[in-house]
Image (cartoon, rainbow, N blue to C red):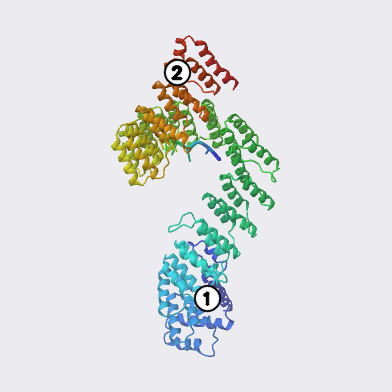
DNA sequence: CTAGGGTTAG
């Protein structure tokens, strides 16, 4: 008997512990574990004689027919003056009852029978009812119902009851009720734990503003519920979440909160600090990131390497070498060990700034431990350096570095090969690139789409479109699929050689194999088709682009406007302009220059000038290209005086300086109109103004001089060409060969050509 | 750490 009693008592105690609301974990609220670290204080254990009273009362209440025989006993037990009474007595009885409904009956019994209506006692009894209900099936509905009941009966909530309700209401997504509980709860009862739960629930429901209000209150000086570490955890975890359904927090708000929390002695933990710095740097707020990190450093918060690395990444992107150095020095001073990532960031920055030799030196120092810490370079670091070497045309050294990395037990991976393949492709050494490709396959380092695109692009850029296509097909049958970039590269290459049919064929192929085109694929085709004058096809692609849900951008509209102009379809061009306006795509200087060029070339100088005024009104300043278009058009329309007037006006005004193209237009035009003298004076003008002639300038001059047979002047220019290392093209050679042979000056021609051979071998 | 693609005008 004794034994069974004590064992039942043990199990009761165990049960009671399990039933404590703070220890019941709810799986959907992972933070609860955190929240439980500071629960509301548990009630003190009841005195021994009270315990038996509670047991007795529970027995009476649970007896099946207690109504008549038990009620007298019960009344005596609970309300006689000889009974011990403690404020938690009724709650403890209620807690041990079988169900919330039974407990509610008990509550009613007390409310109608107790001689004195002690509100606090009633509240705490109702808390027990909430606790029971929270562990029963359909707890949400029951709790909501009980909450309403408590309001009807004017029973104030206890702090634990309110906490329980807020969680439950949160799970039921009932924001108004959550706020109701928070407002209703007596403010003297509120504590930090309760506020944390409210904030957590509000954030989870997406009501960041409401949560923010609660946080603000907590951050007031002398607040009743000052924030603790858990508050910080909840708030910053929520603020740093990637996307917000209702609103996003801007960096300033977050940084403001960080410093306010800091004043209360609450700091972000290390991962969150790193996350915040990364976010700030990504938003180009490196200054603020710098301040945040240094603020934490100064206030004695913990700063780990990862946070410094995050800031270094931002500084590296800004090319802020000064602060990069400062930060690394600080790290060493503060005993924050740089790691392989830290050095990787530094080396990457040096390589990107084409300071590869410094980066290589740094690698050696790093290995030797003279940078404060000895760190073994990893594959990423070697790849960074190999890429750096390749990007400055030192791919052979990149290759040697790959050998060296092998010696250091670092295995090259796909990225290593991709960097080298790109290096050799850019250098035009396509064969070597292919060899590397074969080598990687042999080593079972598998190529990826970057490898494919690099090689395809390399071949296309070096005029080997057919090989590129063949390679692409081979890869596809080997299971390496092309992506939108691969197709863009090939389509572009075919457009460049004016093979529009092939370009379209690849576009159709990509649709067929299920590779979804992105906007750039469409833009590429529109550009290619417009340039080729295939405006019907271009319009067809535009429709497809729109069907796919993309929009045209300014560049594409410009291509189309230009295409329609070239086909003399001014109405279609204007249609495009109208569409641009409707779509809110702003015309830029290209748009206006295209129009001005077309209008003036077709003799519509008046309208061209109207467009130019509109351009200025829209805040786009006419450039040298705009004036070039007008000058060109006046020349084409045999109004060289007008063209020369614009040129002189330009020369006297300082904003727009004539460039080589302007001079070329005029020189070409003057030569063709038998005014070689004026053309020559323009050549002289160029020399004075420091505008370099190019092969087009010389070709125009040679033709003009040939027509007037001005040999001496031609020889002068030939010498200047050699001097300036301006290479002749086939036009130059054709004109000079014909002319100089006819006048018996082949020797001069020979010297001219040899001049280049000499300067080529010596340079 | 690697490619990334369409840039239109005289």
Distance (Cα) linking label 1 and label 2: 101 Å
**Badge 1 element:** loop
Report whether A22 appears left or right of A297: left
Chain ID at mark 2: A
- Quadrant in the rendering for residue A319: top right
The answer to which of A290 and A707 lies nearer the viewer is A707
The residue nearer to you, when weighing A691 against A147, is A691
Q: Is residue A514 visible?
A: no
The residue labelled by disc 1 is A189
Q: Residues within 10 Å of mark 1 (few under 14, many from 20)?
A: few
Same subunit under labels 1 and 2?
yes
- Reading the image, the residue beneath label 2 is A705
Residue A584, visible in the rendered structure: yes
Residue A562 rendering spot, x and y as whole percentages: 35, 35
Give the label on residue A52, or none.
Answer: none
Find the residue positioned furthest to the bottom.
Answer: A81
Q: Indicate the quadrant containing the C terminus of chain A: top left, top right, bottom left or bottom right.
A: top right
Query: Callout 2: few (<14), some (14-19), or many (20+) C-alpha neighbours within 10 Å?
Result: many
Q: Tag 2's secondary structure?
A: helix
Q: Which is in the foreground here, disc 1 or disc 2?
A: 2
Q: From the top left corner, tell me how far across and down residue A645 is, in percent.
A: 41, 32
Callout 1: residue from which chain? A
Question: A112 or A100: nearer the eye?
Answer: A112
Q: Is residue A49 above or below residue A412?
A: below
């Amino acid at each position: 008997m004794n034994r069974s009693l004590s064992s039942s008592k043990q199990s009761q105690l165990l049960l009671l512990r399990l039933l404590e609301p703070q220890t019941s974990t709810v799986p959907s609220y992972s933070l609860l574990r955190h929240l439980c670290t500071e629960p509301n204080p548990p009630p003190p254990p009841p005195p021994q004689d009270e315990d038996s009273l509670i047991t007795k009362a529970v027995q009476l209440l649970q007896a099946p027919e207690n109504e008549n025989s038990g009620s007298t006993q019960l009344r005596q037990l609970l309300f006689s003056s000889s009974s011990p009474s403690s404020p938690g007595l009724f709650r403890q009885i209620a807690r041990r009852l079988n169900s919330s409904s039974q407990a509610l009956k008990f509550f009613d019994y007390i409310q109608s029978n107790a001689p004195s209506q002690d509100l606090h006692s009633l509240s705490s009894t109702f808390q027990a009812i909430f606790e029971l209900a929270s562990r029963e099936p359909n707890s949400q509905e029951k709790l909501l119902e009980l909450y309403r009941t408590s309001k009807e009966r004017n029973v104030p909530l206890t702090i634990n009851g309110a906490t329980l309700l807020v969680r439950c209401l949160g799970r039921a997504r009932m924001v108004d009720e959550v706020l109701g509980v928070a407002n209703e709860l007596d403010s003297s009862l509120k504590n930090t734990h309760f506020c944390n739960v409210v904030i957590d629930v509000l954030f989870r429901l997406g009501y960041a503003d409401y949560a923010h209000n609660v946080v603000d209150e907590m951050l007031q000086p002398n607040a009743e519920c000052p924030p603790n570490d858990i508050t910080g955890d909840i708030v910053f975890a929520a603020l740093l979440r990637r996307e917000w359904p209702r609103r996003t927090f801007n960096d300033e708000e977050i940084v403001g909160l960080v410093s306010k929390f800091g004043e209360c002695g609450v700091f972000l933990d290390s991962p969150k600090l790193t996350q915040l710095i990364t976010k700030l740097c990504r938003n180009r707020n490196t200054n603020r990131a710098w301040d945040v990190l240094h603020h934490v450093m100064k206030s004695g918060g913990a700063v780990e390497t990862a946070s410094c690395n995050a800031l270094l990444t931002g500084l590296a992107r800004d090319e802020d070498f000064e602060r990069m150095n400062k930060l690394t020095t600080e790290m060493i001073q503060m005993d924050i060990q740089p790691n392989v990532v830290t050095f990787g960031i530094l080396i990457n920055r040096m390589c990107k700034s084409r300071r590869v030799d410094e980066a290589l030196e740094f690698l050696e120092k790093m290995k030797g431990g003279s940078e404060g810490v000895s760190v073994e370079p990893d594959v990423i670091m070697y790849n960074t350096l190999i890429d750096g070497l390749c990007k400055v045309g030192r791919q052979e050294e990149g290759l040697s570095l790959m050998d060296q990395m092998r010696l250091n037990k670092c295995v090259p991976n796909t990225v290593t090969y991709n960097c080298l393949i790109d290096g050799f492709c850019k250098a035009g050494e396509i064969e070597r690139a292919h060899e590397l490709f074969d080598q990687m396959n042999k080593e079972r380092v598998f190529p990826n789409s970057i490898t494919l695109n690099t090689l395809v692009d390399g071949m296309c850029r070096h005029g080997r479109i057919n090989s590129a296509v063949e390679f692409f097909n081979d890869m596809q049958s080997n299971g390496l699929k092309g992506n939108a970039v691969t197709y863009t590269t090939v389509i572009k290459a075919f457009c460049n050689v004016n093979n529009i049919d092939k370009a379209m064929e690849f576009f159709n192929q990509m649709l067929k194999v299920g590779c979804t085109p992105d906007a750039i694929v469409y833009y590429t085709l529109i550009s290619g088709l417009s340039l080729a004058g295939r405006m019907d096809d271009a319009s067809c692609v535009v429709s497809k682009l729109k069907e796919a849900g993309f929009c045209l951008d300014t560049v594409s509209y410009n291509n189309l406007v230009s295409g329609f102009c070239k086909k003399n379809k001014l109405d279609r061009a204007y249609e495009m302009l109208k569409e641009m306006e409707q779509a809110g795509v702003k015309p830029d200087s290209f748009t206006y220059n295209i129009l001005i060029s077309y209008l003036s070339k077709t003799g519509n100088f008046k309208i061209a000038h109207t467009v130019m005024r509109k351009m200025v009104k829209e805040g786009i300043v006419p450039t040298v290209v705009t004036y070039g278009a007008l000058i060109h058009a006046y020349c084409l329309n045999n109004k060289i005086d007008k063209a020369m007037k614009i040129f002189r006006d330009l020369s006297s005004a300082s904003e727009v300086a004539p460039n080589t193209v302007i001079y070329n237009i005029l020189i070409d035009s003057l030569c063709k109109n038998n005014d070689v003298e004026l053309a020559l004076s323009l050549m002289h003008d160029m020399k004075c103004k420091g505008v370099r002639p190019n092969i087009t300038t010389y070709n125009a001059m040679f033709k003009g001089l040939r027509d007037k047979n001005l040999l001496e002047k031609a020889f002068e220019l030939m010498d200047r060409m050699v001097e300036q290392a301006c290479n002749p093209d086939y036009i130059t050679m054709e004109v000079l060969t014909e002319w100089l042979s006819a006048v018996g000056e082949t020797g001069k021609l020979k010297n001219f050509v040899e001049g280049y051979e000499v300067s080529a071998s010596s340079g």
